[in-house]
Every structure is written in C-alpha cells, then in structure tokens.
Image (cartoon, rainbow, N blue to C red):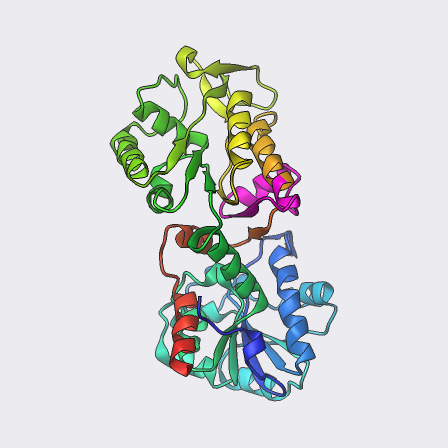
C-alpha cells in the first residue's frame, strides 16, 4: 500500500497532531487493559526523538456530541505517564481558546492530551469546520489509530485532507501485517473464523472464500454449515434460516478452490456449565438431546495438520465456548500449533477482532503470533474487504503529494 510513514516527514519543532485510540476498557475509574496505550509508546518515543511537539487526539466512549464528565480523558494522563515514562499535560478542550493556549505552551518533546473529540458533534459527522479547527492546531497529522480507521470522522479522515499526513508506527505495523496476511500473502493461506452466527460474519466469509485456500470454521457458525450439509446437530446453536446462505458460500468456495473445513467431531453437553459432563460425538452419531460446545480432538488434530502445510494464517474468533473450561481445548490446541509454527518461522500468523485476543490469551500464545490486532470493528471490516476511510485518506493524501 502506498502511504507515507514517520520516516518520510520532518517533524522537528513542529506540532504533530497524533490521532491515537485511547478508548480503553475501564473498571472503577482505572484502566483494566493498557494494551493500546503500550502499543503507542514506539510512536511517542520516535516523535520525541525527532523533537516534535506531540498533541494527542482521541475519543472515549459515546458522549454523542455533548460534554459529559464521565467521558473526559483527563483521568488518563496518569496512566499515559506510567506507561510511557514521560510527563503528559491535559487541555480541557480539543478546539478553541483552551486548546490553542495549551498547544502554544508546548515545547519540543512535550506531550499534550486534548479533551475527547467526541464532545463535539462535528467529530462523528466529519464536519469540515470542526476538522479545520483541529487542523489549525498543528503542522503535521500522524494517524496511529487503525482501530478507529473504519470511521469517517473528522479526526480520523477529515484531518488527513488538511495537513501533511502519515501513518504512525502502530498503524504502519497493522497495515503491513494485514497486507501480508490477506492482500499479498505467501500461500497456502488458511483462515480460522469462529463465532456464534453466520449472519454476523457473512461479509467476512464471502470475502475470505475468494482469497484463502482453507477456511476453517468453528463455533455456532460451523453448526449452520453442518446443518446445510444435511448433518444432524442435536440442540446445537445454529441459524436454520441461514442454511441457503451457507450453501451459497460453499458453492462460492468451490468455484474459488477454497476448501471449507468443518468439524469432524464435537464435544457435546446436555447443559452448558463449568465442569459439565461432556462427551465427544462424531457427525454420524450426534445425540439429539445434546449441544456442541467445542470441536473434538479429531477435528483439532485435522486442523493442526492442515496448518503444517500452510504459510499464512488469519485468525478471527474461537473454535468453541472457550470462556468455560474445559471447552477451550479445541481453540487451545489449534492456537498452540499455530504458535509453534510461527516460532519456527514456518507460518505468518495474524489474528484479531472480537473475542480472538481473549481466546489466544487463554491459550497462552498471545505473544507467539506474528501480529495480534487490538482493533475490533476495523479489523473485521478489513477482512470483509471494505475500504477503511482513515486508511484511504492516508493513501489519497500520499498520492496527491506525489
């Protein structure tokens, strides 16, 4: 992809408007997961090394264009200082006199956090006037918020048309990883897609069957495909009204030489609960009074063998109800195989979206994949084949400058 990065711009002494995603999970006023903050540190350090004046833009929650104290970003300054080991000041607005004065007081190497951009209705409507007020504060725009790039908002898309714009290190890494996994991957390519419903990932499935060699399905959506193939699945979660759609996807996969891989056996229970009595059932002897909650050992082994013959893996969603032990075994087994192959430099593995990060953390392999995306909606829209406005603006800005 043709976009500029921090290596392509001189920011010394300049005010850099850094779009970050600080919409982090919070419990009782404390950040419960600082992953997104930690991943911004390399960009912060590089900008400070380049003597930039760093002004951070971010959203937090959904204040719907109104100033609401519970959505203020001020509480984050302590966490940012803790994670980045540097002083962070705060401005009570992101435009207007308070913002301008705070930016004016900033020196090279300083970090200023502006108030929640979503306190202004112009942010989500991508209002040109609001975008211009933001742009007036800085000299260069650095977008390091891939996880917000699927929104055509003023601070993610509008700004890129008003200032010299480049991707931050996190955005660059994310785009390169996704490009390597889906746009120009080393083949054969496998995709693991899990989740409860076909209907929620219809666009994902339709796009992937045209791009990967193996589409490995787990969770409730796999049950719908099994049902479409005429299998009995007892009381398992499925979408009978999506059977025709599943058959259409199967046909599209066949036309594109993509093999859809479904469970050969399932872990089944009468009632889903921790420690519930469980059996393993093959498809030809599926009990009518039980539900599938995980792929069986035979299925996990089959997927692991397939991965040994692949060069690239894209992962989105668990194979079963991993949140309740021991029904995480299928997901864990496949994830551990992927991690081993990655560590042996035999597989490029990229994962993200939804429950994926939690599932891979549970499997103990979160640090063993090539790249783990913390983006939810943006990751899903990317693998659906959609154009992300925040990314498209960076590419357009670059081609215009060229």
Q: Is residue 203 left or right of residue 337?
A: left
Q: Position of residue 292 (x, y in %)?
A: 46, 22
Task: State left or right for residue 187 relative to residue 128.
Answer: right
Q: Quadrant of the N terminus?
A: bottom left
Q: Is residue 287 visible?
A: no
Nearer to the camera, 248 or 242 = 248
Residue 159: give x, y in percent of width and height.
43, 77
- Horizontal side of residue 164 vs 47, given as left or right: left
Please say if 38 is above or below 271. Answer: below
Q: How many numbered dots are placed on residues in this image?
A: 0
Q: Position of residue 114 (x, y in %)?
A: 56, 75
Q: Is residue 356 magenta?
A: yes
Q: Is residue 346 magenta?
A: yes
Residue drawn at x 40%, y 53% is: 381
Q: Nearer the viewer, residue 219 or 126?
A: 219
Pinpoint residue 97: horizontal percent, then vertical percent: 52, 86
The quarter of the image holding the C terminus is: bottom left
Is residue 207 visible in the rendered image? The answer is: yes
> 51 or 75, which is in the foreground?
51
Q: Which residues are magenta?
A: 341-368
Tell me: residue 251, above or below residue 105: above
* Residue occupying the point 42% across, 67% down: 390
Depicted 242 relative to depicted 394: above or below = above
């Amino acid at each position: 992809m043709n976009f500029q990065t921090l290596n392509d711009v001189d920011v010394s002494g300049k005010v850099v408007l850094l779009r970050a995603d600080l919409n982090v999970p919070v419990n009782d006023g404390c950040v419960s997961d600082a992953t997104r903050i930690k991943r911004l540190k390399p960009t912060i350090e590089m900008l400070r090394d380049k003597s930039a004046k760093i002004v951070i833009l971010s959203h937090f929650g959904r204040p719907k264009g109104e100033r609401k104290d519970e959505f203020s970003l001020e509480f984050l300054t302590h966490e940012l200082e803790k994670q980045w080991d540097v002083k962070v000041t705060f401005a009570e607005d992101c435009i207007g006199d308070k913002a301008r004065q705070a930016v004016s007081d900033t020196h090279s190497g300083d970090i200023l956090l502006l108030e929640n951009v979503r306190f202004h209705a112009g942010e989500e409507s991508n209002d040109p006037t609001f975008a211009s007020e933001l742009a007036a504060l800085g000299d260069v725009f650095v977008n390091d918020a891939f996880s917000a790039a699927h929104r055509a908002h003023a601070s993610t898309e509008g700004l890129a048309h008003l200032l010299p714009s480049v991707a931050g290190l996190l955005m660059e890494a994310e785009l390169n990883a996704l490009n390597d996994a889906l746009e120009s991957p080393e083949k054969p390519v496998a995709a693991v897609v899990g989740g409860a419903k076909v209907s929620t990932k219809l666009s994902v499935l339709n796009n992937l069957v045209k791009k990967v060699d193996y589409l490995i399905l787990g969770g409730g959506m796999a049950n719908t495909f099994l049902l479409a193939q005429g299998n009995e699945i007892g009381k398992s979660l499925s979408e009978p009204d999506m059977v025709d759609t599943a058959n259409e996807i199967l046909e599209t996969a066949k036309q594109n030489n993509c093999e859809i891989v479904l469970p050969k056996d399932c872990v089944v229970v009468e009632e889903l609960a921790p420690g519930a009595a469980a059996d393993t059932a093959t498809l030809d002897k599926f009990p009518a009074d039980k539900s599938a909650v995980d792929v069986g050992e035979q299925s996990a082994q089959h997927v692991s063998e397939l991965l040994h013959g692949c060069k690239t893996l894209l992962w989105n969603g668990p194979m079963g109800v991993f949140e309740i032990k021991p029904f995480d075994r299928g997901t864990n087994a496949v994830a551990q195989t992927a991690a081993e192959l990655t560590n042996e430099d035999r597989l490029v593995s990229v994962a993200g979206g939804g429950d994926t990060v939690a599932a891979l953390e549970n499997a103990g392999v979160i640090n063993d994949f090539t790249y783990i995306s913390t983006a939810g909606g943006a990751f899903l829209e990317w693998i659906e084949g959609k154009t992300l406005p925040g990314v498209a603006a960076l590419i357009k800005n670059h081609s215009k400058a060229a």
